[in-house]
Image (cartoon, grey):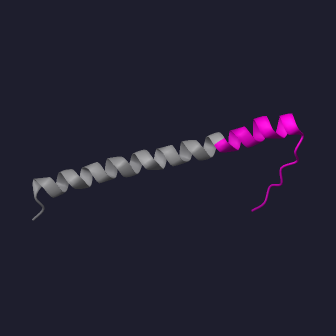
Amino acid sequence: MISRFESAKDEKSAIISATMSSADSDLLCMSTMFMNDIVKSNFKVKLLMTG
């Protein structure tokens, strides 16, 4: 049987994991926008799309 303490700890872990995942996605999105909008237009760099 799971105690209330362990359940609360699991809930906190889930919230932290979801927050970190969202922060990671936000950073990836911002870096992509930065590369496409700022670097590409200001420095006339041709970005290679691979993958």
Q: Is residue 8 left or right of residue 15?
A: left
Q: Residue furthest front?
A: 43
Q: Is residue 25 left or right of residue 44?
A: left
Up-down relation of residue 26 to residue 11 (above or below): above
Q: Residue at image x 36%, y 48%?
A: 16
Up-down relation of residue 33 to residue 10 (above or below): above
Q: Residue furthest bottom?
A: 1
Q: Residue at image x 17%, y 57%?
A: 6
Q: What is the quadrant of residue 51 in the picture?
A: bottom right
Residue 32 is covered by the magenta coloring: yes
Q: Nearer the viewer, residue 1 or 39?
A: 39
Q: Quadrant of the N terminus?
A: bottom left
The prevailing secondary structure element of the residues shown in magenta is helix
Residue 10: give x, y in percent of width and height.
25, 55
Residue 3: give x, y in percent of width and height.
10, 58
- Tally of numbered discs: 0
Q: What is the quadrant of residue 34 in the picture?
A: top right
Up-down relation of residue 50 to residue 28 (above or below): below
Q: Residue at image x 49%, y 44%?
A: 23
First to last magenta residue range: 31-51
Q: Nearer the viewer, residue 38 or 18?
A: 38
Residue 15 is covered by the magenta coloring: no
Q: Residue at image x 58%, y 44%?
A: 27
